[in-house]
Amino acid sequence: MQVASRSRERASAPLVAALVMALISAAKPTAAAASEVVRDVKTLIDNTQLDLVDILTSPLHIADENSVFRSPTFYLVFAGVAGLWAGSFALDQTMRSHLHNMNPSTADLLQNISTYSIGTGAVATYGGGLYAADARLRQADITGGEGAVVATLVNVGIKAAFGRLRPRQDAHDHDAWFQASGRSFASGDVTPLFALAAGISEGFDNEWYVAAPAYSLALLDGFGRMGHDAHWFSDVVGAGLLGCGTTELFLYLHARHAEEPSRWRFFPLEPTAPQAEVGRTAANSVLGIEVAYDW
């Protein structure tokens, strides 16, 4: 079962690469499209750098007036997330009793459907944003990709820290935490899929007809992993919360970055078309230099 899972991961790479090439070739291979791709890469580099600064310096701003810890919404969301995970933990044995005897080929099929559909959806979303010159759609999708990478790396540490045994290691005890051989919590397969699904959903303003299928397809991978008796239900829900939460965090940070154009960037923000036109018009009548620095 482990070999089959790894072969599935190896097979997904060329498929996604082929989809990327096909969509880029179909998305008006013009200088304008190439310029948009370059701009997206620059924005990703800038946002990643700013994300790192924000996260590393966040402890210094806990007591700030606009800190999330002063917002009642933060505690409501935290309580909801904690309650959702606690409910999934209570259902661990019930869900396992229904899924762990699944035919291995069926479990693989569920995982393949999930991986390929979410991967294809993410690539298609970026391709659609490129074709329609929709920067917001592309940025939401790219943020989902960033969330997938970061959440996967964070999950490596979570697995090592919590050391939870997999069901097939100890089928009778879902409380087997902090074991040297435990790597069940949270699911490494499910985490990036939920992060990508969150980016796809955000690109379409979280409309139900996009969000519902995106998250449902991501969840299929979790059911497939449970079919292989590799995870408890709470491992899958925890992975989903980690993936979604990471993407949502970056979406929030990136919105703040857009409101702070004076912050240092590798690639300074380019003016929008209307601003550029105003600048050219003003240049015809006024000559001068302006220097601004925000400490």
Image (cartoon, rainbow, N blue to C red):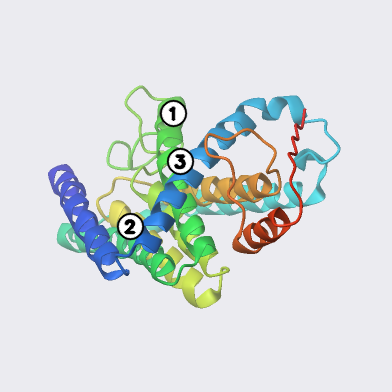
Closest to the camera, between mark 3 and mark 1, is 3
Q: Which amino acid is tagged 2?
A: Asp
Residue position marked by numbered label 3 in the rendering: 151
Return the x and y of residue 158 as percentages of the image width and height. 46, 32
Res 221 label: 2
On screen, residue 195 above or below 55: below
Residue position marked by numbered label 1 in the rendering: 157
Closest to the camera, between mark 3 and mark 2, is 3
Query: Do we see residue 86 in this rendering?
Result: no
Res 61 label: none
Q: List the single residue furthest toward the bottom.
A: 209
Is mark 3 in CB contact (under 8 Å) with mark 1?
no
Is mark 2 in CB contact (under 8 Å) with mark 1?
no
Disc 3 to disc 1, C-alpha distance = 10 Å
Q: Nearer the viewer, residue 22 or 199?
A: 22
Element type at mark 3: helix
Q: Which amino acid is tagged 3?
A: Ala
Q: Rate crowding at label 2 as few (under 14), some (14 to 19) or many (20 or more) other CA atoms within 10 Å.
A: many
